[in-house]
Amino acid sequence: MLKVEHIDKTFHAGTIDEKVLFQDFSLMVDDRQFVTVIGSNGSGKTTLLNIIAGELKPDRGKIMLNGKDLTAQPAYRRAKQIGRVFQNPAMGTCPGMTIWENLSIADHKGKFFGLSFGLNSKRKSFYQTQLELLGMGLENRLNTPAGALSGGQRQALALIMATLVRPDLLLLDEHTAALDPKSSDTVMELTQKIVEEKQISTLMITHNLRHAASYGNRIVMMHEGKIVLDAAGEEKAGKKMDDYLKVFNEISIECGN
């Protein structure tokens, strides 16, 4: 379970550019819950993920994961428990390394390599089994450099890498935004499949309202550092696209647009 407790975050404090984003902000994500987060630019979506991942420090508040306080931990330590897939397909994989080498690195996440061989042939069949989940034929291309793959293939590989050693929490940072529509839909279908099969608590931010409405079992809409809509389970399933657009339009009018 993830608990974001009473977070404050101000940028450029004490200057003319001071921006108060979060004031006493809290959010809880239950075990095995797949939460999609939407909101306008500047609503705090990416900042929230960066605070959870340890890339940014809150001015006040706590980040708790499965009862453990992560607030003081740097990002590299949190990475042992938190998987993340970024918007840019190039950020989740090493282009000069083969698919096999990329998976081997992900498989040793948080472990000490020592002086043993980097590639373990005994794990090869396991990697192929994981890649078969993608339905892209990558299980037969283990010796192909990741840089030779398409954007959709690389993002799918990054998704497998982020969940190869099952994380306590998966963060998806607009991970389909840089893909063409067909690849975007394919990666989202794979995301839902992997999250459900591995039962991973997931927090996904997106600008794609259709994806936010169609995937996951909870939707959160943010505006100016606050949650303005939160629907889960049957309530989420019962909402239509017009329900979300109505809230967006109300926010737009409030902001003078």
Image: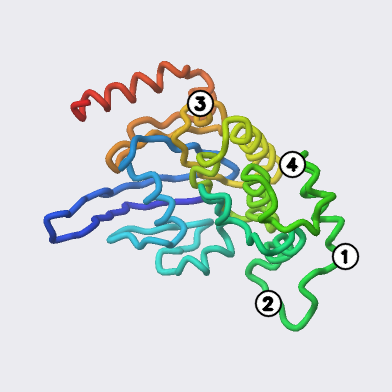
Front disc: 1 or 4: 4
**Seen from this angle, which residue lies furthest front?**
148
* Gap between marks 4 and 2 measured at Cα: 29 Å
> Which residue is denoted by mark 4 in the rendering?
134
Image position, residue 111 (x, y; %): 67, 72
Colouring style: rainbow
Q: Is mark 4 on a helix, strand or loop?
A: loop
Q: Are marks 4 and 2 in contact (CB under 8 Å)?
A: no
Q: What element carries label 1?
A: helix
* Gap between marks 1 and 4 measured at Cα: 21 Å
Image position, residue 134 (x, y; %): 74, 41
**Seen from this angle, which residue lies furthest bottom?**
115
* Gap between marks 2 and 3 measured at Cα: 42 Å
What residue is rendered at 88% in x and 65% in y? 122
Q: Which amino acid does label 1 sit on?
A: Lys
Q: Which amino acid does label 4 sit on?
A: Leu
Image position, residue 116 (x, y; %): 79, 79
What residue is rendered at 71% in x and 41% in y? 197
Which comes before the other along the chain, label 3 or label 4? 4
Image position, residue 106 (x, y; %): 68, 62
> Which residue is denoted by mark 2 in the rendering?
112
Viewer-closest of 18 and 167? 18
Which comes before the other along the chain, label 3 or label 1? 1
Circle 3 packing at 10 Å, graded few (<14), some (14-19), many (20+), is few
> Which residue is denoted by mark 1 in the rendering?
122
* Gap between marks 1 and 2 measured at Cα: 18 Å
* Gap between marks 3 and 4 measured at Cα: 22 Å
Q: What residue type is labelled 3?
A: Arg
Where, by quadrant of the figure, is residue 34 drawn? top right
> Which residue is denoted by mark 3 in the rendering?
210
Viewer-closest of 82 and 183? 183
